Every structure is written in C-alpha cells, then in structure tokens.
Amino acid sequence: IFRLAKYPVTAVEFAVSGTGTEELRTALATEAAEIGVDVAVVSAGLSRRAQRLVVMDVDSTLIQDEVIELFAAHAGCEDEVAEVTERAMRGELDFEQSLHARVA
C-alpha cells in the first residue's frame, strides 16, 4: 500500500495479486459507488510503471472546489470569478462565455 497524495485529495495505490484485473474491477465497482470513491484498476507491468500522468476534470468531482476559483483567490479576484461561476451554473452563460469572463 502506497499513499500517493493526501489532503485535499487522498490517493492510495494498492498492489494486489491473485485475481484478474476485470474480476477485481467488477468486485470493487459496487463498493466504490456505495461509499462514494473512485477506483482505477490497472494491470501491473513495466508499461504501467512508465505512466505518470493522469488528466481529469476534478472540479467539484475529485475535489470540492472549482480550481479556477482557487486560482482567482490567489490572484485576489475570487468574488468576481465566483459570481461568474454561479451565473454559468444557473444557465445564464454558456461555457465559452463563462470561461472568457473568468480568465479575462
């Protein structure tokens, strides 16, 4: 068991042997859904060890915050960006309008 990350996101890697990838994925899917965690089952091997990049949309899924709002807080304009985000969530702005307004 290896802890890969902690707060605000916890990531743990388990090295498991004795069962196939698909069987393990199936067995864990229901449990993961019940407790609200994401699980990725990947076959071990040299190609797996060479992979070091995961790209995903983490806003309000993997983490509870909007990343763009975290950047805005750092830049001192969190309130303005949060208001644009709220307008987009209410359907008042489409994605392109919202993104432009938040990063302009």
Image (cartoon, grey):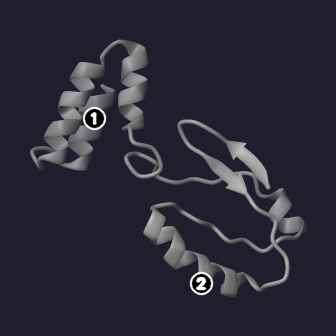
- At a point 38% along the width and 38% down the height, the residue shown is 65
Residue sticking out furthest to the top: 76
Q: In the image, which disc is placed on residue 100?
A: 1
Left-right relation of 69 to 29: left
Left-right relation of 76 to 31: left
In this rendered view, identify the residue nearer to me: 46 or 29.
Answer: 29
- Residue 94 at what x, y percent from top left? 18, 49
Q: Residues within 10 Å of mark 2 (few under 14, many from 20)?
A: few
Residue sticking out furthest to the right: 46
- Residue 22 at what x, y percent from top left? 67, 86
Instruction: Tell me the quadrant of the picture where the N terminus can be found.
Output: bottom right
Q: What distance separates the C-alpha of mark 2 from that of mark 1?
A: 41 Å
Instruction: Tell me the quadrant of the picture where the C terminus can be found.
Output: top left
Front tag of 2 and 1: 2
- At a point 63% along the width and 54% down the height, the residue shown is 54
Q: Secondary structure at mark 1?
A: helix
Query: What residue is disc 2 on?
Result: 26
Based on the displayed image, in which of its 4 quarters is residue 26 positioned? bottom right
Amino acid type, label 1: His
Based on the displayed image, in which of its 4 quarters is residue 27 positioned? bottom right
Sequence-wise, the earlier of marks 2 and 1 is 2
- At a point 60% along the width and 46% down the height, the residue shown is 10
